[in-house]
Image (cartoon, rainbow, N blue to C red):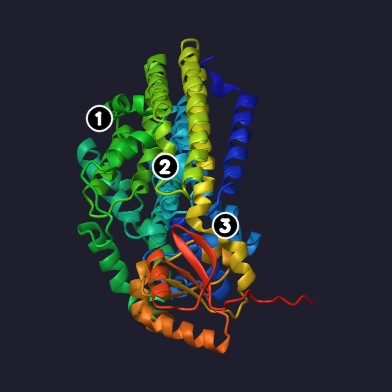
């Protein structure tokens, strides 16, 4: 039973079932702010404006990131229409691509058993499986960096034929180029730094003669340069903001207010690697040396994981998803370790997941207590039900995996992977009521009843990341520039910088009978009430108040 990877019917069944769950989950949840709403809206605006050079958010120039994901989202919208699964399709495909490449690299380097184990580990790791269903840039970046990593591994293995080495090295260079177009210069800086460190640690100086540097650089620049040139020609302000503000200042300072302690990513790695955390120490210890002569892939994989983890740990800007690119490397190392270690590693990992589930059950009453107001209380109670059921099933599945591992390492590993993957998906599905609240989509019927294409729509004291996509239109921002500050400096005519200016517009429209709608922060609403601003509330929750300037609902004449 340790040869499950040789059973073609079983592998096909697992693949079909996994993909069915994977693709279903792309459409099962609301697009949650901030990232999901932001990048969906940018793709929508690219389709509407038909401008594929200058990215925009809420109609305002937005230069924080390169355009690859926006291009892919826009292309998906043009092909399949606007929707939630369409907005997540690119990240979903990038997650699957990473899993497929890990399996391919594992097979080429170590054989079918390692390929099966490594792909199983990556597919079921909580952070990888979760972010494969979130419309954020980091999975796109991780997918393209996995192209670079796995292509390099396949190209540099000792038995690679010359043509194979050339073709896979060109794929590596293309992966780095697409990573740059995904999220900037880290797409080449990180792989380049890893290669230098690997050369020193492995003393593999000859690898530099096998990189196809000239052809690779030509391909890299052919993919990356055109957009950077075109966007700079159209927007002279782009270069400073993108290369200085978004790269140098982001890494060396807290300019984006995303700082964290040096150990920030330690708990994220521990949770994100579940259910395989118990295998990590030994897998990394095994990576310190490689028995292979010439190219030493385990040293490269270990260097990749450690350097990228340290790089983001010392950065002045931290978000949980930043370390996602290390997971394919860890999956390959863990896959190798599982083939050597036997049942004990699987049982340790299953035991740790069981302990995690037991703690979740013990702390279950605290989930409902997390609500900060009466509106949120039923949402947290409902999520608590999902957490409880998930924790119970996880506990049962983990104990079953421990028992099964005594008979077959692969069967125990497979059962543990299924338990981990399904647990993560259930936790995400259970979050949907809170996601709808955060996105504000419960107010869509009230908004759509008030709005026509000509109705002015303002957002005061906050910025809604998801509602513009669902409404299919932009909003005029007031007072709160949020992340669009730089774009508004270039296009100040697109917003109202003060609440006083907004009140003047509102009073003028009210006096003339011009229907106007605004989404207000709670403090803005309280201020306007004190000022006697004529408003009719059409939507209200703890995060926002939605008002109309018409004191009576508009009449809709059917035709």
In this rendering, which labeled residue sits more in front, label 2 or label 3? 3
Badge 1 marks a residue whose secondary structure is loop
Residue 330 percent location from the top left of the image? 36, 35
Mark 3 or mark 1, which is nearer the start of the sequence? 1
Residue at screen point 57% across, 57% down: 442
Left or right: residue 524 compared with residue 429: left
The answer to the question of whether label 2 and label 1 lie on touching residues, with beta carbons closer than 8 A, is no
In this rendering, which labeled residue sits more in front, label 1 or label 3? 3
CA neighbours of label 2 inside 10 A, class few (<14), some (14 to 19), many (20+): many
Q: How far is mark 1 from mark 3, CA to CA?
A: 53 Å
Residue at screen point 48% across, 12% down: 403
Q: How far is mark 2 from mark 1, CA to CA?
A: 19 Å
Residue matched to label 1: 288
Residue 150 is labelled as 2
Which corner quadrant holds the N terminus?
A: top right
CA neighbours of label 1 inside 10 A, class few (<14), some (14 to 19), many (20+): some
Of 143 and 264, nearer the camera is 264
Left or right: residue 324 compared with residue 387: left
Can the viewer see residue 107 in this picture?
yes
Q: 156 above or below 338?
A: below
Mark 1 or mark 2, which is nearer the start of the sequence? 2
CA neighbours of label 3 inside 10 A, class few (<14), some (14 to 19), many (20+): some
Residue 169 percent location from the top left of the image? 40, 48
Residue 442 is labelled as 3
Can the viewer see residue 215 in this picture?
no
Of 237 and 448, nearer the camera is 448
Badge 2 marks a residue whose secondary structure is helix
Q: How far is mark 2 from mark 3, CA to CA?
A: 43 Å
């Amino acid at each position: 039973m340790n040869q499950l990877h040789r059973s073609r019917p079983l592998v096909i069944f697992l693949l079909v079932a996994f993909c069915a769950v994977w693709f279903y989950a792309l459409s099962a949840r609301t697009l949650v702010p901030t990232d999901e709403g932001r990048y969906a809206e940018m793709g929508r605006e690219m389709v509407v404006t038909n401008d594929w050079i200058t990215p925009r958010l809420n109609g305002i120039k937005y230069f924080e990131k390169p355009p690859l994901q926006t291009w892919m989202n826009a292309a998906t919208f043009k092909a399949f229409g606007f929707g939630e699964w369409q907005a997540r399709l690119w990240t979903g495909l990038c997650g699957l691509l990473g899993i497929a490449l890990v399996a391919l690299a594992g097979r080429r380097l170590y054989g079918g058993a390692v390929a099966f184990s490594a792909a199983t580990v990556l597919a079921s790791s909580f952070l990888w499986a979760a972010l494969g269903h979130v419309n954020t840039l980091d999975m796109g970046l991780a997918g393209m960096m996995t192209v670079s990593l796995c292509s390099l591994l396949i190209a540099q293995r000792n038995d690679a034929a010359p043509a194979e080495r050339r073709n896979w090295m060109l794929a590596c260079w293309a992966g780095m180029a697409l990573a740059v177009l995904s999220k900037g210069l880290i797409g080449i800086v990180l792989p380049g730094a890893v290669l230098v460190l690997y050369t020193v640690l492995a003393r593999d100086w000859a690898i530099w003669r096998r990189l196809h540097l000239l052809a690779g650089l030509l391909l890299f620049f052919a993919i990356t340069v055109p957009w950077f040139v075109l966007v700079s020609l159209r927007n002279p302000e782009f270069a400073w903001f993108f290369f200085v503000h978004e790269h140098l200042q982001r890494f060396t300072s807290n300019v984006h207010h995303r700082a964290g302690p040096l150990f920030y990513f330690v708990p994220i790695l521990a949770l994100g690697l579940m259910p395989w955390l118990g295998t990590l120490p030994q897998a990394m210890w095994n990576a310190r040396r490689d028995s292979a002569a010439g190219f030493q892939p385990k040293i490269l994989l270990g260097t990749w994981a450690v350097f990228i983890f340290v790089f983001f740990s010392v950065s002045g800007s931290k978000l949980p998803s930043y370390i996602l690119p290390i997971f394919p490397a860890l999956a390959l190392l863990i896959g190798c370790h599982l083939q050597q270690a036997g049942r004990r590693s699987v049982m340790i990992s299953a035991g740790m997941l069981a302990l995690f589930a037991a703690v979740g059950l013990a702390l279950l009453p605290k989930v409902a207590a997390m609500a900060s107001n009466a509106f949120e209380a039923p949402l947290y109670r409902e999520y608590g039900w999902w957490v409880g059921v998930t924790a119970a099933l996880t506990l049962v599945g983990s104990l079953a995996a421990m028992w099964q591992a005594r008979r077959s390492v692969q069967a125990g590993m497979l059962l543990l992977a299924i338990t981990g993957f399904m647990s993560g998906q259930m936790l995400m599905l259970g979050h949907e009521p809170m996601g709808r609240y955060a996105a504000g989509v419960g107010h869509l019927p009230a908004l759509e009843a008030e709005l026509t294409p000509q109705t002015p729509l303002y957002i005061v004291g906050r910025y809604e990341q998801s509602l513009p996509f669902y409404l299919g239109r932009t909003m005029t921002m007031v007072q709160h520039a949020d992340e669009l500050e730089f774009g508004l400096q270039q296009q100040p005519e697109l917003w109202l910088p003060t609440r006083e200016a907004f009140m003047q517009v509102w009073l003028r429209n009210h006096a003339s009978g011009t229907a106007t709608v605004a989404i207000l922060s709670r403090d803005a609403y309280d201020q306007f009430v004190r000022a006697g601003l004529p408003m009719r509330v059409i939507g209200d929750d703890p995060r926002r108040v939605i008002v109309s300037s018409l004191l009576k609902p508009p009449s809709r004449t059917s035709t």
